[in-house]
Image (tube, rainbow, N blue to C red):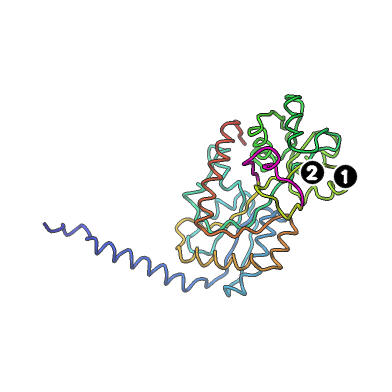
Amino acid sequence: MSMPDHQPTQIQSLCLAGLIALGGHAYAQDYPNRPIRMLTSEVGSGSDVTGRLIAEAIPARLGQQGIVENRGVQAPEITAKAAPDGYTLVLYSTPLWVKPFLQDHVPWDPIRDFAPIMLGVSTPNVLAVHPSLPAKSVRELVTLAKNRPAILNYGSGGAGSSSHLAAELLNSMAGISITRIPYKGVGPATIGLMGGEIHLVFVTGSAVGPHIRSGRLRALAVTSAKPTPLFAGMPTVAESGLPGYESTTPMGIFAPAGTPAAIIARLNQTISAILGNEDIRKRIFDIGAEVISSSPTEFAAYLKSDMARWGKLIKDKGIRE
């Protein structure tokens, strides 16, 4: 029995798919032929600094200018609505894929609206306490919190921030209840910690390093899954009695959904080579971050895993912005 004329045969479908693939490959061969813009958050932020290091190296590798645009909280939305042609990228952190759990109406979907290019860099936090606190390890802190329920407190930035979620993950995994004291940012929270207003804070090492070295604060552990050269000799929270604990601030690079796979692959290869440069790796290390350079597939898998983990914690704790 013959197929109706209006239905494509399997051979026709395969030919159509092949033509589409060839068209995408041909388009990628002509890419790029104009400047590439990379949207990031605020000036001076980790994504801004990293984005500028990448953008400065793009001309030598792709023959076109790399432009950084600081679009703040609007960066993900602008990228999601941009043409999927590889000329608009976004370098952003956890809020891009966690914010939908914190708010009801977010103008983008982390999975539907973006094509992952790579997980670029990751910044761990340090669990720091006031020197007067009688705890010199995470185990001692947990014991103290259990013996003094609802007495200890921590400072954090905004709801759903890295400093907030890191502390709530500690509460959840250790079965304790350290009370949150909200600040306008981790800078004010750190000042509050040094002044004895609060007992502890989760903050980037670059922010508390000088205060730890001066003895004004005490570092208990780093929040990365494994020990890091960023904090040589410092134990992780995971190996200090909470196996599986991890809370970092990763920064990923995305293109709009629908960007041809060949362009995604070329961007991944190019940016991986840039981040692999020894000088750039050192400059990123100096701001308290580590280069990751994942593949698009690895980044996509990481996103789903990270969203599941933080989504559950946010829901269980009733965290809202």
Disc 1 marks a residue whose amino acid type is Gly
Residue lying at 64% horizontally and 34% vertically, measured from the top left: 173
Question: Looking at the image, which residue sits at the far left?
Answer: 1
Look at the picture and state if 1 lies above or below 29: above
Q: Position of residue 75 (x, y in %)?
A: 59, 53
In the shown orientation, is residue 116 left or right of residue 321? left
Tag 2 residue: 219
> Can you tell which quarter of the image residue 194 is in?
top right
Look at the picture and state if 313 lies above or below 83: above
Q: CA distance from mark 1 to mark 2?
A: 10 Å
Q: Position of residue 123 (x, y in %)?
A: 68, 51
Residue 215: mark:
1
Q: Position of residue 184 (x, y in %)?
A: 74, 40
Look at the picture and state if 101 lies above or below 260: above
Q: Which residues are magenta?
A: 233-247
Residue lying at 60% horizontally and 46% vertically, measured from the top left: 95
Residue 103: mark:
none
Mark 2: secondary structure:
strand
Look at the picture and state if 216 lies above or below 90: above
